[in-house]
Image (cartoon, rainbow, N blue to C red):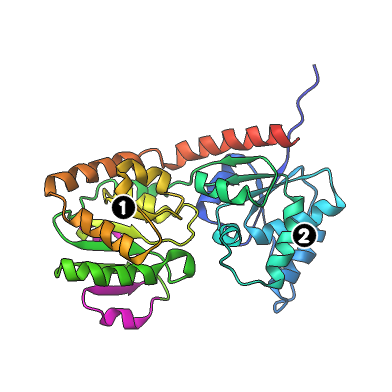
Amino acid sequence: MSKKKTIRTLFLHQVPHYVHEGFAKSIHADFLRCDKSKIEFMPTTLKLTLNGLSLPSYDVYLCDGTGPALSAALKKIFSPSCKVIEIVAHPEYLMLTLGLPKKSVYYKIIRRVVNPQIDGIITVSKFMKENISKMFDVPIKIAYPFISNEMYEKLGRITPNVETHTILSIGSNVPKNGMELLVESFKKVKKEFPDAELYMIGRGHPIEWSAIDGIYVKGFVEDLTPYFEKSSLFVMAGKGQPFPVATLESLRAGLPTIVTEKTGTKEIIRKLGKEFVRKVDVEDIAHGICKYFDMTIERKMKLSKRARELSKPFNEEERCKEFRVQFKTLLEEIT
């Protein structure tokens, strides 16, 4: 009986998300940062191009984002026997399908050069699979992300303050996060609940938002624990979010969580109740927040307990195990 060939996998990245790094380690992939060059001021796209032409030979290139996929695609053009698998968890592809990014030379390269060379995709939610299926005619598997071990344990010990009218939102001020929608929604909530507060954690929020009654702009925060503890509700007003880990962390902290219909985590959040998945609309988001604030304390406590239960499967061990299964299945389909 002949010995089964070992498939060698190279994980291509720029600055990898810790979840994707964990996925790659779980399949014993080698790692290579593909945007480095001895010429310091060379444009990143040129670095990715040149490095792609000189990549070491592997059977499979597992790519973390469109940049690494560009390098792998160029390698595949000259070595067609290799396989390119893209982890589609970054908003770039979602932005493309939703029509949000500006037309640029980079995205034209992605569409015309990179996409045709991709053999298979592992994405992070059903929402993402539905959207990227419009762009790709390749096998697509789903592997949910996980909460880091440290945060998983820490947040599991938190008791949120469901008696308050305090909202928490975590995310930088970029289009995918819809922070401006949340600010406008909060203004409407404030009229119904004068003691309502909104804590916004993340980079790039306009300082002017701090001048709005009840809004506290905190920027980057090292320790999120005090904010989870003081809050009653978490809101992610996403315009195109694949599967934000922040919403998993909020569930782990026992915080009932509102997301939009354009946020991948909706397939988990919906198990709290359909009212926790809102339209990408200021009025509808505000209505969802007010509906939650109108609930009894007993109901909120039950929802808090349910939120924590929903978070349990999102630990590193379980999610990496599932990633290995999906990666193996995908390889069988494309090789």
Residue at the right extreme of this rendering: 78
**Amino acid carrying mark 2 in the image:** Val
Numbered circle sitting on residue 113: 2
Picture coordinates of residue 189 (x, y %)? 22, 67
Q: Please report the residue visible at 48 percent of the width from the left and 64 percent of the height from the top.
A: 176
Which contiguous range is marked in magenta? 205-229
When asked about the image quadrant of residue 8, the answer is top right
Say whether residue 189 is left or right of residue 316.
Answer: left
Q: In the figure, 316 relative to 111: above or below?
A: above
> Which quadrant, please, contains the C terminus?
top right
Q: Which residue is mark 1?
A: 257
When asked about the image quadrant of residue 234, the answer is bottom left
Q: Is residue 154 visible?
A: no
Q: In the figure, 284 relative to 106: above or below?
A: above
Regarding mark 1 in the picture, which secondary structure is present there?
strand
User: Is 220 in front, or is 301?
Assistant: 301
Say whether residue 101 is left or right of residue 75.
Answer: left
